Image (cartoon, grey):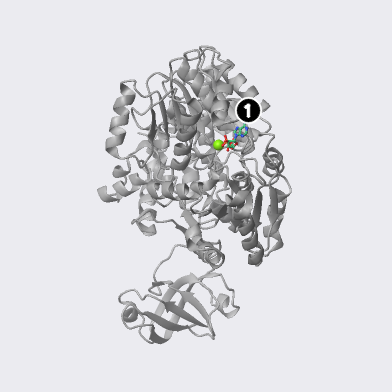
Amino acid sequence: MDLQDLPVTEVKHVGLQAAAILRGRSIHTAGDLLARTPRRYLDLRAADDWNLVNERVIGATVALVGTVVDSKRIGPMRGGGVSILLREPAGRGVLRVVFFHAPPGMAARTPLGAKVRVIGMLREGRGDLELHQPRVLAPDAKFAPIEAVYGGISTLAPATIARVVHSALERANEWSDPVPVELARTMKLRSSREALLAIHSPATNIPVDALIALQRGTSWAHQRLGFEELLAAAVVLERARKSVGHAQPIAFDPSVGPHVAKRLGFELTASQHEAIDAILRAMTIDQPMRRLLVGDVGSGKTLVAAAASLATLRAGRAVAWLCPTSIVAEQHAHTLTRGLGGEGAPIAVLLGSTPKRARTAARKAIARGQIRLVVGTHALLEDDSIPKDLGLAVVDEQHRFGVAQRMALVKDRAAHMLVVSATPIPRTLALAQYGDLDVVTMAKGPSSRQPITSRVVDPTDQEYIATTIRRALEANEGRGRVFVVVPRIEADDASAVTIAEADAMLSKHFPRDRIVILHGQLSTDAQREALHAFRTGSHPILLGTSVIEVGLDVPEANLIVILGAEHFGIAQLHQLRGRVGRGGQRAACLFVPESREPSARERLDEVAGCSDGFVLAERDLERRGAGEWFGEEQSGRDRSFRFADPLRDRALVIRAVEAARDILERDPTLASHPALDRAAARLVARGQHPTAEDAG
Ligand code: ADP
Ligand code: MG
């Protein structure tokens, strides 16, 4: 069996309980485990050197032997800490070691006069340099010169994860390499096994810059394993593109667009008209349509997808919409109810949070053919949630999903598929993620729209921010709505404004009962309630995280204030800005960086100065790559890829696509490339297991 498919329960040191926790994070196999790369590497090769202390190299990691010359308790007696003073043996250095919470037995291990080794990072203390909560070893204990540090998973401690990953690593020679031998040879690729070892257990003589590349995920080893993924994905996409499956032709019905627009109270824009036309025509033949609808934020893509859905329903086929979050799913269900005016009713909405009973009932009705239109999140990908006679699958805001999920949705189904993308897509990304799709572009949004005024505001200028919010609320006869967005719910690395901080700031200027909080960790009910309070205007200020970035549509919203704005990627900032001014009113956006550094402002000035998503994309993707474009959280990254980054590894993407075409040309069934065939199947299968982060 390929190591990639070996169940985690077969990995040494993984008990049943641990396996259950791992499964909860979609870690089912040894391959999944090995894709958990170290969070960072501790380089202790030059750390056994008191000069780091004597020269006050703040931030350096040290592993020093010292003599305990003082030890005292700090804080309350119970649950308190210990402060120890170490002296360099035969030297002048002193180092204070502070345990805010002393582990049991610490005092006994560090009596006066004892020698110990401490491993930690040097910090500026009050007088002496300090180590906080260091690791304490016997002076002669062995320590790894380079240590891979893993993140914990739920109740599994980092050390436990390290142990089980390394158990899996022992079997690295069972990893099956999908790259054909000849190709690996011409590309001069090293083996998968070497790549896995390099990542999880770097050689002790590795140069520092190579270690940094490992940490950033840009090393040769990441590219090596990334190429495997890209090749498998290219095979999947190429096969999907070529499969002349059979789909039910949908009769061309030019009335659906105007019909839906009218029900929603609009005139179709020229772009909408063209897009609907192209899509309806593509569905009239018996070959499944595979189309990517690309349009800037706010260009009115939902209506286009709704019109295609109506045509499909009228032709007697069922329709499914896969949405990125519960909020968006419910919003689309609402729009479809209005826009389709009862055709296609009743609509089933299936979310991760849908109670089991309701889900079972819905599935039964779907099986009986009573439900023709289902809208949902990943919950849809579970068995029996999709009508058997599916005519059209709509996948909204695709960049949250991966190749794998998309394939899972239409697998074995002769359905047409319309993928709706929120962001303009560069060519290499399109090749790696959308190689099976034809593109339709919507150039312009409704002409009734006024340009959004964007401005970068100094973080200390709270009066200005508060006044702008107040004016926005008062606009449109007091019906204004304001989004305030922060990068994180809680600060996890000291920087980045939190919900609580923003709440405290807002509460200084506005009554508490005007503010409602929305973020992804609230229950679906709480999210729904929060959104309702905002939509109806009972709470016209919505303070939230970037959950609102994806597809949220509140026509009255006329101001968005983005705090800690430098923590968002350019695409995210543009998406967030697209949440306002949708009702045609005047609207504005304030980018408020957290830091006053000029570098924090630079990118914000750029977004503020350009309102065209396509132009922004082109400019910035070329220049800065995926990380900057999608932001720190990598929300745009296809989760089907663990090592590959299609935007960064452009050359590899092109190579993978060429290779996949070539291989399939000569060996269409992959009979002589079984490992590659299995890798492709594995990638598709992964789409059927929603991950915890995916469960919207
Ligand atoms: P996106 O392309 O970002 O998904 P939506 O489909 O959510 O955009 O549409 C953005 C906003 O524009 C919504 O409030 C929608 O109701 C509105 N809208 C859509 N089509 C039209 C139109 N033809 N005329 C005016 N407003 C429209
Ligand atoms: Mg949308």
Q: Find residue 94 and report its horizontal and vertical position in percent.
A: 51, 84
Q: Find residue 170 and report its horizontal and vertical position in percent.
A: 38, 47
Task: Looking at the picture, tell me which residue is in the foreground, 564 or 374.
Answer: 374
The response on whether ligand 1 sits within 8 Å of label 1 is: yes
Observer able to see residue 70: yes
Badge 1 is on which residue?
A: 267
User: In the rendered view, does 379 fall on the left or right side of 287?
Assistant: left
Q: Find residue 28 and report its horizontal and vertical position in percent.
A: 35, 41
User: In the rendered view, does 420 fall on the left or right side of 37?
Assistant: right
Observer able to see residue 146: no
Numbered-mark total: 1
- The correct choice, above or below, for 239 with respect to 382 in the image is above
- The correct choice, above or below, for 197 with respect to 158 in the image is above
Image point 66% across, 34% down: which residue? 446
Image point 69% across, 34% down: which residue? 447
Taking the view exactly as shown, the residue that stands out farthest to the right is: 609
Q: Find residue 151 and report its horizontal and vertical position in percent.
A: 43, 56
Which image quarter holds the N terminus? Answer: top left
Ligand 1 falls in quadrant: top right
Q: Quadrant of residue 278?
A: top right
For badge 1, the amino acid type reads Glu
Considering the numbered disc 1 on the image, is that residue within a helix, a strand or a loop?
loop
Q: Quadrant of residue 35?
A: top left
Task: Looking at the picture, tell me which residue is in the foreground, 539 or 284.
Answer: 539
Please tell me how crowded label 1 is: few (under 14), some (14-19), or many (20+) other residues with Cα within 10 Å. some
Which image quarter holds the C terminus? Answer: top left
Task: Looking at the picture, tell me which residue is in the foreground, 467 or 461.
Answer: 467
Taking the view exactly as shown, the residue that stands out farthest to the front is: 477
